Image (cartoon, helix red, strand yellow):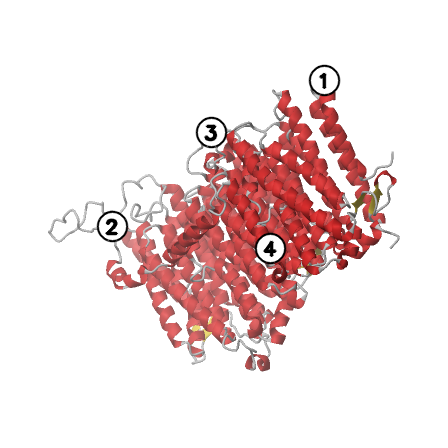
Amino acid sequence: MMNTYILILLILFGGAFAAYFLNKLAPILSGLTAFAATTIATILFYTQVKIGSQVQLTIGGINLEWGINAYSWLFSFIVLGLGTLASLYSIQYMQNKERQGYFYLNFLLSIGAMMGILLSHDFVSFFIFWEIMTWSSFLIVIYNGKDVKKIGIKYMIFSAIGAYAMLMSIVMIFAETKSFLISDFINLISTTGFSNHILMITLLLIGFGVKAAVMPLHVWAVGAYSNSPMSYTSVFSGALSKMGIYGFGIVMLAAMTYVSPTISENAGSGYSIISIEVIKIIFQWLGAITAIMGTLYALKQTDAKKLLAYSSIAQLGYIITGIAVGTKLAVMSALFLAVLHGIFKGTLFMAVGAIERQTGTTDMTKISGLIRKMPWTFIASLMSIIALAGIPPLAGFVPKWLLYEGLITSGHYFLVILLFFSSTAAFLYCYRFLFGLFLGQEEEETKNVKEAPASMVIPMMFLAGLTLVFGTYPGLLFKPIANAMEFVGMHDVTWNMTVLSNVWGDTVSLNLVSIAIFVIFISAALFLFKGMRGTRYVTTKDISTSGEIPTENENLTYQLDFFKPFERAVAPLYKRTMDKIYNAIGESLEAVFDFTRSIYTGNGQTYAIYVIVFVVILLIFKDSIF
Amino acid sequence: MVISPVHYIAVPLLAAFTIPLFAKIHKELTRIIPGIVLIYLTYVSYVLMSKVMTTGPIVEIIAGWKAPWGINLVYNGFSGFIASLMSIMGLLIWIYSYKFKKVDDEPALKFYILFLMMVAGSIGITITGDVFNMFVFLEIVGITSYSLTAFYRGRDGAEAAFKYLLIGSFASVFLLLGILLLYTHVGTLNMAQIAERMHTIPTSVKLSIFVMFAVALGIEAEMFPLNGWAPDAYSQAPGPVGAAFSGIVVKAGVYALIRIIFTLFDIEGSLQFLIVMGLITMIIAEVSAIRQTNLKRMLAYSSIGQMGVVLIGFGIGTTEAIFAAIFLMFNHAIIKGLLFLSGSFLVYNDDKKQIASLSRFGKKLPVVSFLFALGAFAIVGFPPFAGFWSKLYLLLAAADKNLIFLIAIILMVSVVEVIYYLRVVGKLYFGKEESKIEPKKPAFNSLIVMLILGAIIILVGVYPDVITGFIHNAADTLSDKATYISNVLPSL
């Protein structure tokens, strides 16, 4: 019998090529193939695979080991679940677009590669799949052909820097342990301490940090997220960025929690300044800064895609902070948010994609009042936005509660303030997103807009429904999270199916909250519905201006310059962007490159002189050179 | 007839000189005979390599004169591997260029004669066991390369060939000088015997001789600062010749340099010298490549850069590192071969060979563009393509010797490599506006060759074990100097 892991990967990778070639017959076939492949892989995975089983392979004299553990099991939800739904969504979204074969090839390749990453127990296969994921997502990022140089190449440069940092770390780990197994790396750290291996750990963290879009490695993310087709962006932001979190967790959790206390106390011969604590603090702060900056930039956007992209960066910042704090509560909230972010950001990107498909634009200043045209999309967006903002009864409330409690109990008061600021500011862009797209006045341009087809609405609604389920019964997610945390060495994680409690004795019974809110919601709806008969629709021109006639330049819509006072208040924060710094570095490097290139003058005489000078130098200094 | 390594040299040389005669019988024979010869050489490689893998090295004595008096050919794991690689590359390039200059028979005749001699000479450099013999082959390769560089009559080609000739003549002079000096001190030209007597030469003389050899062969191996000829020669020579330069000729140069350093001389610092020179070569070449607007020049610089990495691999000097370096040579031959072959179709109708001119060729030339992209992905070392494994092994070997700084530099340069290759791929598929130039559709035979190379790249990438056995054997052979000597000179 063929091993299930290999079978799953074969289905995904084989499906990728099948999708590519079937496109020649009929474009719709590649979409269906992608959906079939992800569905079969998902079914196989959850029926056939058991946690703990593994398989060994030897390629090129290197032993590879594939298997699944509780920790990777948790992330498989995001990859397979979101992958399947996104591929269903994709069928109609990509309809009538060109190069569908190309798109689905890379779509399936990247999903297969993500699965491969989760299956890898050794660094070589981890890296191989990581790179496949990187280049296949790169190929999708440049799919639209827009700004290949600015967006695509930038993504690739950062990915390459990250990947090569990781590769360097991997070979260093091998030189030390003579093994590629990730578990041996964890053993190495836990037996010899953290600070003796600071270089390899830093390099690994850089590698993962790029994918997780941590400041200051985040500059590629906005362009890449907003530029790829939305059906992929939901996977890109929802699942692919979580691979960075996954790796980050391996280093920050598994490797750290197993370090025996005696070693961490006497840590560091020579590098004692950079201990575990320092690294933790650095990433806590980087995470918090990422969260704040992401939020602030999201506020400024008028394009819904970019807004969501910045919001993704901000959310990843919370996750990073949670993991870096490293207490049970914080980690639990981070992992919860990791899964949840896949759900609601996946939905939101899908919703924006639906709007883009139906209206042709995602610019929030151009469209508005879609609520009656696209009601299902609106409901899905509304639920996801509520989840994103962290309002009960939807699931976003749970990690927020846990994270604040985790930070307060571990004494990170300043971080609490930062994150609180950021999540409050997040309300503003959440509101803008909903208002800009769905509420407000209906415009002439959107008169003939229709709801997206069912195969696009179903995945959105399904995911939106999940936010309610996990908001009411967070225990459904706590269970695998607790298992995952057990696996990475954090034992005795307590959780409850429906009740959140904290050390101060407060408890929140979520199903009661849900029921209460639900009742209020239903009765309000009934009430409104009853009163609906008496309402009349207000047309665009029917604006009450209290008798004053608005002038030309008076702002009647809230879509433009919505948060101007706020933006003005935080303006200094916008000034220095990492982008500018990187561009400056790039330009100076180009100057250096140009200078170096001029060594090759193209003149035969110069080359002859080089040869002679070289020989003379060698002959004169031969005794000292050799 | 018993197949022996002599056939590698004798058959193509004989064929090269008799092609004009056959051409009198039928014009098509001009094209067919080189093919038959190269198929035969590939067959010879197959037979001999299977013999080497089972029973060990083959030492062929020419004309009954035993070593150290006569010339001998040493066909062991390393030289055999490189020679086989050269004959296969030769065969593929022949298929690719079968219709080359179809309308014009006179240049075709010249092309095939020169090409056969170039392959024969390169293989000769690889399998000979005699330094003077090596010099002779180097001259054959040199002269044929100069002529092929200037194959397209025109100012640029002539200029490139002249530069090549100028620098190449330095190589000849220094090599000859080195051989002379060596002969006066050890009184033999046989490599094994030289190696065995090397310790008798005074150090300072030995170093001077080494400098002569290193410079002469460094020119052929495209070592900085001796590689000024290379970008011009690559970009002016016809497409298949560019592939042959990177797949065959440079390999011969690197092989000779490595053979000299590992077998002939016993200088401790020579390995560090290789690392440093390889590093400088790599950095300067890759950095220059990123600023190129001419596709062929870009490929040429990248080729130089890769040779730098190969030198670093050999310079690290452990068996694992040598393994990685030989793997890298193999990968470079197939991948850069594919890039040159597909690239020359992409810029076929653009006189300036501009990268900008192939904007959106992905639609017009889907297969060629795809293969070029595949080659680009493979050469920068993306898994699951062939280039990844050699890079991984090289870095592992470097990490094993704790050369952290070296790893960092190699990887930083790799980022540069990623940028300029993906820029071309991006242009190919998603360029801003469609190029006005009509691309040339590849002929069937050329397409087959590119597909074969692409298939090898994927096969080796997914399952490197198909090739690692040979490379391990090659690496073991190279690092075992004593066995080399005892194979050639059994009496000692």
Question: Residue B423 at x, y = what percent?
Answer: 48, 44
Q: Please name whichever residue, A144 or B274, is drawn nearer the observer in this view of the structure.
A: B274
Question: Residue A445 at x, y = what percent?
Answer: 29, 40
Q: Which mark identifies residue B433?
A: none
Disc 2 to disc 1, C-alpha distance: 99 Å
The N terminus of chain B appears in which quarter of the rendering? top right
Circle 4 residue: A618
Is residue B336 visible to the viewer in this orientation of the structure? no
Asked where in the image residue B106 lies, by quadrant, the reply is: top right
Q: Are marks 2 and 3 in contact (CB under 8 Å)?
A: no
Give the chain letter at badge 3: B
Disc 4 to disc 3, C-alpha distance: 49 Å
Disc 2 to disc 3, C-alpha distance: 64 Å
Q: Which mark identifies residue A535?
A: 2
Are tags 2 and 4 found on a single chain? yes
Circle 4 residues within 10 Å: few <14, some 14–19, many ≥20: many
Single out the mark in the foreground, 1 or 3.
1
Q: Please name whichever residue, B266 or B43, is drawn nearer the observer in this view of the structure.
A: B266
For numbered disc 3, what is the local secondary structure?
loop
Badge 3 amino acid:
Ile
